[in-house]
Amino acid sequence: MAGRIEWRNKGKGKDALLFVGEYGEAGDTVIKAWPADARLIADFMNDMTSLDIPVQGLETEVDQRSPEQWGELVMTRTPDGDVLYIEPEGYWDAVYYYFRAYGRDPHPWVEQHAAKT
């Protein structure tokens, strides 16, 4: 199934990752949603190995299928990992909120390397 993964934010700590694609006649339908935390966002920003990207089927309730209702768009990627869009201010605000405020980095290699030194 073609589609995209969207990171959306409704406020500090109120983030979600969404698989958005075509369903029926609607072109932008939330097929699946994951509540996002620092671990999942770091994975989304890097290699996307934790996301169980759907191949078929609709997993969201009818009142949760509009991407806009999940908040402001922060970043969009293809299921293969290509970055399609980044909203700079929202992106850096979220990086600070989830990582920098705690002295952490969103890239796992940096975290592992820092722990060894």
Image (cartoon, rainbow, N blue to C red):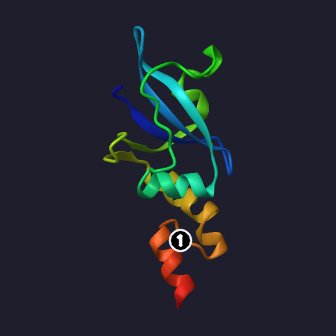
Q: Which residue does the image show at 36% across and 25% down from the upper left?
A: 1
Farthest residue, direction top:
25
Q: Which residue does the image show at 53% across and 91% down from the upper left?
A: 117
How many numbered discs, if any?
1
Instruction: Provide the secondary structure element on which disc 1 rests.
Output: loop
Given residues 54 and 29, the one toward you in this image is 54
Q: Position of residue 106 (x, y in %)?
A: 52, 65
| Residue type, label 1 | Asp
Q: Which residue does the image show at 51% across and 25% down from the upper left?
A: 30
Given residues 68 and 52, the one toward you in this image is 52
Q: Judge from the rendering whether residue 116 lies leftward or rightward of residue 55; answer left or right.
A: right
Q: Is residue 10 above or below residue 109?
A: above
Q: Is residue 6 above or below residue 86?
A: above
Q: Is residue 43 above or below residue 15?
A: below
Q: Position of residue 66 (x, y in %)?
A: 54, 22
Q: Which residue does the image show at 66% across and 72% down from the upper left?
A: 102
Q: Callout 1: few (<14), some (14-19), or many (20+) C-alpha neighbours within 10 Å?
A: some
Q: Judge from the rendering whether residue 89 lies leftward or rightward of residue 98; answer left or right.
A: left
Residue beneath label 1, please? 105
Q: Position of residue 31 (x, y in %)?
A: 51, 24
Q: Is residue 117 above or below residue 112?
A: below
